[in-house]
């Protein structure tokens, strides 16, 4: 089975690549390395340095005849989408359309698309189910929602099968500070280097934090499911406050970090938790890492990476 992972040099994409290679699939990565890194590229995969907006994308798809495409490449941050809506739209909408056109021309069997909880925006009903009202507050949420509509239309008009995975806040090894789930990466680095932690707001805001290997497993299962053409939340369905994250990280590292509380950020929603029943029903999947396990693995990896620094806190 030949699978192309766009954004496969990024945080989540690189874990998906690892999972597919474990299952002995033939894996290709297409990435322009704008936020990803060559260090994340698994040597077992074929790496193609290219932009998803490249006009020659079709030629590549026709030559390689991928069976499946997992589309992770994107402009991934809310603030950037507000600073530069044109750039966000160019990558997340026009880039996706370029991938969809290449896919249908080359006879790709199915595309799996990385969507986001950001498509729901501010809502009153928790946990958020897939059919809840979509009210994105940012251009990022909007561009992901438009992307979903394109996938639905490519299926209706051209029979290109799809699975949309709406990720909650993803965390784990190789995450940079800037992404959606980046708060865990930022706090972990602060604790491991004995620096204070800055919390925006009073820390009672909640998120549904899901470990990256659970997200990679969901992508793998999305290729295999006999029940495609649907949108599924990929989440733990449990709500954790930012303060609780600090408590667990402090416990694992046996540290007592200084915490500064700053003004709440504009556009920051108070609660986020996604219902995951549909994913459990339609994929052979359920989240298998507890928050404490995922945080431990994240801290351990980070502590190794920054171990050369002085005063580093080690996680055994
Ligand atoms: N991290 C989260 O918590 C989270 C939550 C919801 C959804 N998502 C979605 O998951 C996907 C992966 O996000 P991530 O956190 O791994 O981000 P990331 O920035 O680590 O990965 C994105 C990858 O896409 C590549 N890329 C960006 N623009 C490209 C282009 N024009 N052409 C080719 N490659 C390009 C980057 O170089 C990078 O390797 C994204 O679609 C993101 O919107 C992430």
Image: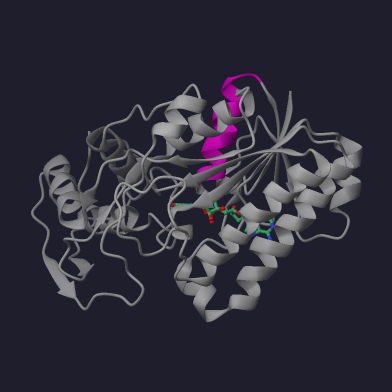
Residue at the (38%, 40%) spot, across then down: 235
- Above or below, 46 against 203 in this view is above
Name the residue rendered at 22%, 48% in the picture.
Answer: 240
Q: Quadrant of ligand 1?
A: bottom right
Q: Quadrant of the C terminus?
A: top left
Q: Is residue 135 visible?
A: yes
Residue 249 place in picture, x, y as percent? 19, 47
Q: Which quarter of the picture shows residue 304?
A: top left
284 or 187, nearer to the observer = 284
For image coordinates 18% across by 59% down, the residue present is: 194
Q: Is residue 264 magenta?
A: no
Q: Which residues are magenta?
A: 12-24
State the residue lying farthest toward the left: 256
Q: Quadrant of residue 298?
A: top left
Which is the main secondary structure of the residues drawn in magenta? helix
Whether residue 217 is situated above or below residue 82 in the rendered picture:
above
Q: Choose between 306 and 215: the one closer to the eye.
A: 215
Q: Residue reaching furthest top?
A: 24
| Vertical arrangement, residue 31 with respect to residue 281, above or below | below
Where residue 101 sits in the image (x, y, percent)? 83, 51
Instruction: Report x, y in % for residue 287.
Output: 37, 30
């Amino acid at each position: 089975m030949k699978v192309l992972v766009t954004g496969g040099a990024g945080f989540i994409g690189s874990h998906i690549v690892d999972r597919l290679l474990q299952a002995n699939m033939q894996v290709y990565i297409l990435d322009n390395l704008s936020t990803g890194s060559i260090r994340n590229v698994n040597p077992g995969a074929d790496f193609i340095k290219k932009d998803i907006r490249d006009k020659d994308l079709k030629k590549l798809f026709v030559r390689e005849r991928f069976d499946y495409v997992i589309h992770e490449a994107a402009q991934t941050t809310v603030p950037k989408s507000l600073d530069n809506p044109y750039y966000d739209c160019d990558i997340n909408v026009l880039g996706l359309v370029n991938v969809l056109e290449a896919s249908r021309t080359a006879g790709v069997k199915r595309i799996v698309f990385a969507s986001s909880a950001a498509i729901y925006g501010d809502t009153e009903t928790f946990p958020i189910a897939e059919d809840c009202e979509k009210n994105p507050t940012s251009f990022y949420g909007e561009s992901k929602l438009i992307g979903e509509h394109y996938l639905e239309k490519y299926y209706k008009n051209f029979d290109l099968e799809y699975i949309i995975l709406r990720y909650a806040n993803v965390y784990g090894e190789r995450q940079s500070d800037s992404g959606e789930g980046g708060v865990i990466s930022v706090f972990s680095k602060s604790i491991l280097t004995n620096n204070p932690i800055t919390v925006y707001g009073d820390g009672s805001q909640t998120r549904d934090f899901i470990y990256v290997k659970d997200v990679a497993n969901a992508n793998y299962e999305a290729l295999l499911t006999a029940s495609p053409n649907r949108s599924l939340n990929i989440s733990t369905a449990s709500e954790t406050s930012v303060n609780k994250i600090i408590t667990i990280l402090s416990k694992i590292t046996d540290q007592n970090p200084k915490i500064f509380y700053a003004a709440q950020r504009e556009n920051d929603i108070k609660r986020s938790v996604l219902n995951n029943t549909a994913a459990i029903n339609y994929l052979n999947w359920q989240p298998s890492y507890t928050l404490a396990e995922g945080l431990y693995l994240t801290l351990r990896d980070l502590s190794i990476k920054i171990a050369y620094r002085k005063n580093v806190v080690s996680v055994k």
